[in-house]
Structures are given as structure tokens and as C-alpha cells.
Image (cartoon, rainbow, N blue to C red):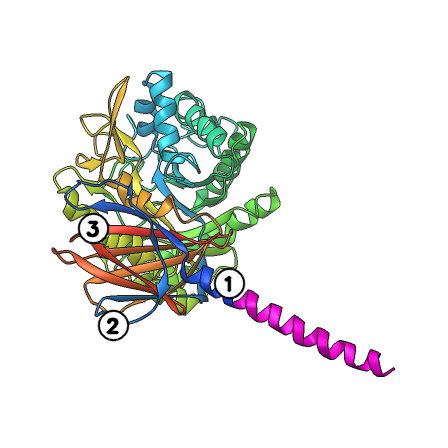
């Protein structure tokens, strides 16, 4: 009994020493953890280029430009990043030789070797960056949608490209958005402006359901929709006005119930899809519809903090779904503005997605409708059948999408310097991605702190670095 009584004391003591040893080894390895930086500079000398690794060490000394990361404080879960794959994009990509087309699609959508763009926004019918305006049912009065058909540009260009993207990334999310209802359903009978007539609410909801059916038959499942692109903009071709009362009535009375009855209640209905200058519209719809998952935003007007306002006042999700880069802008200026306001700005204001506008264009910034954007620059320009150029939007999205995986959670990241902005994420595999942008025109050596460990790193002026470590 005496020996038996003392044996556990020895065992506990030995176990404690082993545990302490393990903890010290873990702490040591944590401090020496390797960090891989990827950089894009405003002067384009480095474009999403991997840099030499650095290592965490003991946190000592002070630095006025300190970025502190705390993976224990978490925020929203990310759905992904990407572009709008307009019908026009698919038209120019379809004209490429097979080898170069495959390379371009892998550059954008491959989760390992490419940008890992994981959300594809597409138009239901034409957008203003289609060759012409069209819908899937031009038969006036066909409220039963007997003549609904995807025949035309979608079957010719869009759907084959989506199928190729799905082979590259089977987990791609498809967000679908109409620029206009069929003309015969509208108050003005035109592709431009006008509103959806209330007598056609049921028919238009059926139009959506038929669309889901037709896409499903093609092997394409829709992840989410917005009822109307830019519902306060009557100027594009196509376009359609839809105020908040009209939108919530359409959703509550017809779209939501018909989707649920047809077995599509799992498809997210995301309201608004317009600028950050109007929070009243999305708050009204979100707080008065149980069918709505959240609200989508653009930033052609307003302040990105509007997304937090809507999130706080509705307790629903927010998504950033469109921002274009213009052909007349500078790489450094556009890259910096989008890094600060769109990529870092939207995600630090609760956005679950970051989407830039057009994926691809031809050298004339087309195709487009007669009333379409004449200055919108795609993520890539398809020069001819065998070559393409990566534009600024490619690097804007790539600087985050390549390192932040779908399912990642945003974590706490704070900067002690006003010229340094950042956002951090923890991926499903436990790895950390920290995106830092230096807003000043000169180089700044920052210190990144995580727990009791830290490392220093010099970031050139007007440049972004994504640091990746762990797992």
C-alpha cells in the first residue's frame, strides 16, 4: 500500500515535467514560425509576387506602425471573392484558343495555382456588358412562362464557360442578378428604366423559378440571387427601378413563397445590390422580410461603413458585390483606393464577399449594349485568341482571394498607425492570412504582433502585402 500510495506522486511529477517541456518546445516553435509574404506594389514592380520568408521571434521593443493580430476574436465567416462573369466576358473568353482559354480560367479560378476566385456573379438575362439586351421570355403576356428558354447568348457563351470553371473549382458559388425584367412586364416597355408592373409579380417570380430549373438542368446550381441590380439606377441598358416597398412586396408576396414551394428555399435572397449612400432601403427590406438573407452593396456613392450600419440594425448578412476600375485610372491609384475601401474596407465592415466588376473584356472595353459602360476595365483584357493582359482588378482580388479560403473567419487586426490599414483571417485549416496596405507614399517598416511573438517587415509606399502563416 505504501509503495502504491507514492507511485502516482512520482508519475504526476514526471508528467508535469514532460508537459512543461512540451509547452516550452511549442512556444519556441511558435516564436520561430515561418511567414510567407506576397506583395503587390503600386508602381507594378511586384505583382502578386512571393517574397522571401520571415520568421516570428520574441516581441520586443516598440514600433509606431504595429499591427496586432488576435485570432481569438472572430467576426464574419467569408463566402469568397471574385468578379462578375458577364455574358460579354464569356463571349471574349470563348473566342480564345483552347490552351490560352484554359490558362486564363485557371489563373482566375484555380484554388491552388490561380487566384482562387470562388464567387461568380452572373446576370439573369443581359447586363450592360452583353452584346445586346435580351431576356429569357420575349413573348408578351406569357405569364405561365411556357416560352421561357435559355437559348441564345447564355447557352452559346455563358453556360459553357461556367461548366469549365466548375471543373476547375467544383465548389464555386454562383450569384445571379437581373438587370431588367422582360420588357413586357415593365411600366415603360423599354430595356432602360421603368418598373415592374404589380400585375406581373407572380409571373416574374415564376421567371426566376424557371431560371433555377433551367440552370439546374445544365448542372449549375444557383447559390444566391439579388432581385435587381442597382434598383435606383434607371440609366443603363438594361436597367429597372425597384424601390424598397416594391422589392419587399415582390419578395414577400411572390418570389420568396414561389422559391420555397419549388424547392429553392435554400437559395439566398440578397436585397438591394446598390450604393452605400442609402442605408434606409436595405434596412427596410431586411427588417420586413423573413425570406431575405442580407443586403448587397456597391461603392459608387456613399461610405463603406454603411455596411456596418445595416448589419447592426438588421442582424443580417452583408455582401460587397460590385466595383469597377476605369480605363482612365492609374494602376497605383486604383489599386490603393480599392485595397482601402473595397477589399479591406468592406471586410472590416462585415462583408462576406468581395466582388469586382467585369471579369474580362476585349481591347475596345466591350462587348456592351448601346447603353453599356464604355470605360469599364475587366480583370483581364483578352487581346486576341492567344494572349491576355492582367489588369489592376486581377491583383485587387488576388491579393486576398489567393490566401483567404471560403469558410475563413475574419479575426481581430488593429494598427497603431493611421497610414497602415489591415484585415486578418483564420482559414478552415487554421492558417492565418493578414493583408496589410501602406497608404503612405514612402516605405514603412511595420511590426506584426501575434501573442508574444512578432516580426518586422518593410512595406513599400502605396503597396500591399499578404502575410500567410500556420498550418
Name the residue tied to disc 2. Answer: 62
Name the front one of labels 2 and 1. 1
What residue appears at the point 25 percent right and 25 percent down from the top-left corner?
Answer: 388
Residue 249 or 66: which is nearer the viewer?
66
Query: Which secondary structure is most common in the magenta stretch?
Result: helix
Name the front one of labels 2 and 3. 2
Q: Earlier in the sequence, mark 2 or mark 3?
A: 2
Q: Which residues are magenta?
A: 1-23
Which element is circle 3 on? strand
Q: Quadrant of residue 312?
A: bottom left
Estimate the spatial distance between the alpha carbons at disc 2 and disc 1, rounded to whole Å: 25 Å
Estimate the spatial distance between the alpha carbons at disc 3 and disc 1, rounded to whole Å: 34 Å
Q: Earlier in the sequence, mark 3 or mark 1?
A: 1
Q: Is residue 363 visible?
A: yes
Q: Earlier in the sequence, mark 2 or mark 1?
A: 1
Name the residue tied to disc 1. Answer: 26
Q: Residues within 10 Å of mark 1 (few under 14, many from 20)?
A: few
Q: From the viewer's perspective, is residue 387 above or below residue 11?
A: above
Q: Residues within 10 Å of mark 3 (few under 14, many from 20)?
A: many
What residue appears at the point 21 percent right and 54 percent down from the top-left corner?
Answer: 459
Residue 232 or 164: which is nearer the viewer?
164
- Expressed as whole percent of the image width and height from the top left, the position of residue 213 reads 55, 33
Q: Are marks 2 and 3 in contact (CB under 8 Å)?
A: no
Q: Is residue 274 magenta?
A: no
For residue 347, side relative to residue 438 (left or right)? right
User: Which quadrant of the figure contains the N terminus?
Assistant: bottom right
Name the residue tied to disc 3. Answer: 463
Amino acid at each position: 500500500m505504501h509503495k502504491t500510495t507514492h507511485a502516482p506522486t512520482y508519475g504526476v511529477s514526471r508528467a508535469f515535467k514532460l508537459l512543461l517541456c512540451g509547452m516550452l518546445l511549442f512556444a519556441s516553435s511558435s516564436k520561430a514560425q515561418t511567414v510567407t509574404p506576397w506583395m503587390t506594389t503600386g508602381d507594378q514592380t511586384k505583382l502578386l509576387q512571393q517574397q522571401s520568408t520571415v520568421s516570428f521571434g520574441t516581441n520586443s521593443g516598440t514600433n509606431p506602425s504595429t499591427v496586432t493580430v488576435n485570432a481569438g476574436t472572430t467576426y464574419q465567416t467569408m463566402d469568397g471573392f471574385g468578379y462578375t462573369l458577364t455574358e460579354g466576358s464569356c463571349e471574349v473568353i470563348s473566342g480564345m484558343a483552347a490552351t490560352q482559354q484554359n490558362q486564363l480560367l485557371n489563373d482566375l479560378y484555380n484554388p491552388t495555382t490561380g487566384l482562387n476566385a470562388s464567387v461568380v456573379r452572373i446576370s439573369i438575362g443581359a447586363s450592360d456588358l452583353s452584346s445586346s439586351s435580351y431576356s429569357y421570355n420575349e413573348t408578351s403576356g406569357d405569364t405561365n412562362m411556357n416560352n421561357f428558354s435559355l437559348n441564345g447568348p447564355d447557352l452559346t457563351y455563358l453556360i459553357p464557360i461556367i461548366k469549365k470553371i466548375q471543373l476547375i473549382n467544383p465548389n464555386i458559388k454562383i450569384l445571379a442578378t437581373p438587370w431588367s425584367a422582360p420588357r413586357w412586364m415593365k411600366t415603360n416597355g423599354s430595356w432602360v428604366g421603368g418598373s415592374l408592373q404589380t400585375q406581373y409579380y407572380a409571373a416574374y417570380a415564376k421567371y426566376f423559378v424557371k431560371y433555377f430549373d433551367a440552370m439546374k438542368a445544365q448542372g449549375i446550381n444557383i447559390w444566391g440571387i439579388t432581385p435587381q441590380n442597382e434598383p435606383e439606377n434607371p440609366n443603363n441598358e438594361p436597367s429597372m427601378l425597384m424601390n424598397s416597398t416594391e422589392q419587399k412586396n415582390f419578395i414577400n408576396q411572390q418570389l420568396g413563397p414561389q422559391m420555397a414551394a419549388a424547392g429553392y428555399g435554400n437559395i439566398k435572397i440578397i436585397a438591394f445590390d446598390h450604393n452605400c449612400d442609402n442605408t434606409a432601403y436595405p434596412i427596410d427590406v431586411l427588417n420586413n422580410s423573413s425570406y431575405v438573407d442580407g443586403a448587397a452593396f456597391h461603392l459608387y456613392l456613399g461610405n463603406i461603413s454603411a455596411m456596418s450600419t445595416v448589419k447592426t440594425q438588421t442582424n443580417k448578412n452583408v455582401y460587397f458585390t460590385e466595383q469597377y476600375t476605369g480605363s482612365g485610372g492609374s494602376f497605383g491609384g486604383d489599386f490603393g483606393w480599392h485595397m482601402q475601401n473595397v477589399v479591406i474596407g468592406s471586410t472590416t465592415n462585415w462583408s462576406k464577399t468581395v466582388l469586382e466588376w467585369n471579369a474580362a473584356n476585349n481591347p475596345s472595353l466591350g462587348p456592351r449594349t448601346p447603353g453599356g459602360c464604355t470605360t469599364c476595365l475587366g480583370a483581364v483584357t483578352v487581346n486576341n485568341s492567344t494572349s491576355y493582359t492582367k489588369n489592376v482588378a486581377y491583383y485587387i482580388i488576388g491579393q486576398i482571394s489567393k490566401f483567404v479560403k471560403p469558410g475563413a473567419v475574419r479575426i481581430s487586426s488593429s494598427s497603431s498607425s493611421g497610414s497602415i490599414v489591415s484585415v486578418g483571417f483564420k482559414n478552415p485549416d487554421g492558417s492565418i492570412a493578414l493583408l496589410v496596405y501602406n497608404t503612405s507614399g514612402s516605405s514603412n517598416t511595420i511590426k506584426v504582433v501575434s501573442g508574444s511573438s512578432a516580426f518586422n517587415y518593410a512595406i513599400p509606399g502605396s503597396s500591399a502585402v499578404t502575410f500567410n502563416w500556420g498550418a
